[in-house]
Image: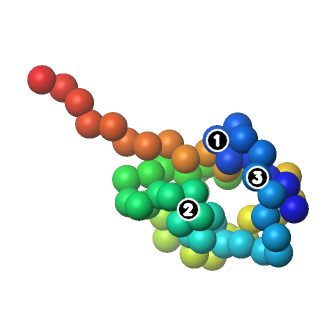
Amino acid sequence: MKIKVNDKIQKIEGSILLSDLLIRNGVKRPDMVAVQLNEEFVKKEEFTKIIIKENDRIDFLYYIGGGF
């Protein structure tokens, strides 16, 4: 199946959980990432329950600290 992750198309064989997609994309600290699935924010406790589907759009939004 084809999905779009951060505006790049990825091909996935079979089904995959959102939590596994995070790992596959090298997200080492999922607690520091907000995830949108088809433009809807996903609660972190749902990462292990959501199965990604054909043509889903997933965006990983990273928290970046800053200041003085």
Relative placement, left or right, of 67 versus 45 is left
Q: Residues within 10 Å of mark 3 (few under 14, many from 20)?
A: few
The part of the image, by quadrant, that contains residue 47 is: bottom right
The part of the image, by quadrant, that contains residue 52 is: bottom right
The residue at which mark 1 appears reads as 6
Towards the viewer: 2 or 38 = 2
Percent x, y of residue 25: 57, 57
Would you place residue 27 above or below residue 58 in this image? Answer: below
Percent x, y of residue 26: 50, 58
Q: Is any atom of residue 40 visible in this view?
A: no
Q: Residues within 10 Å of mark 1 (few under 14, many from 20)?
A: few
- For marks 1 and 2 on the same chain, the one whose residue lies earlier in the sequence: 1
> Residue lying farthest left?
68
Q: Residues within 10 Å of mark 2 (few under 14, many from 20)?
A: some
Would you place residue 25 above or below residue 49 in this image? Answer: above
Query: Closer to us: mark 1 or mark 3?
Result: 3
The residue located at (18%, 26%) in the rendering is 67
Q: Which mark is residue 10?
A: 3
Q: Amino acid at mark 3?
A: Gln
Percent x, y of residue 1: 87, 62
Specify how the rendered protein is coloured.
rainbow
Q: Is any atom of residue 49 visible in this view?
A: yes
Q: Which mark is residue 22?
A: 2
Q: CA distance from mark 1 to mark 3?
A: 10 Å
Q: Amino acid at mark 1?
A: Asn
**Mark 2: which secondary structure?**
helix
Task: Find out whether the residues at labels 1 and 2 contact each other: C-beta distance under 8 Å.
Answer: no
Query: Closer to us: mark 3 or mark 2?
Result: 3
**Mark 1: which secondary structure?**
loop
Q: Amino acid at mark 2?
A: Leu
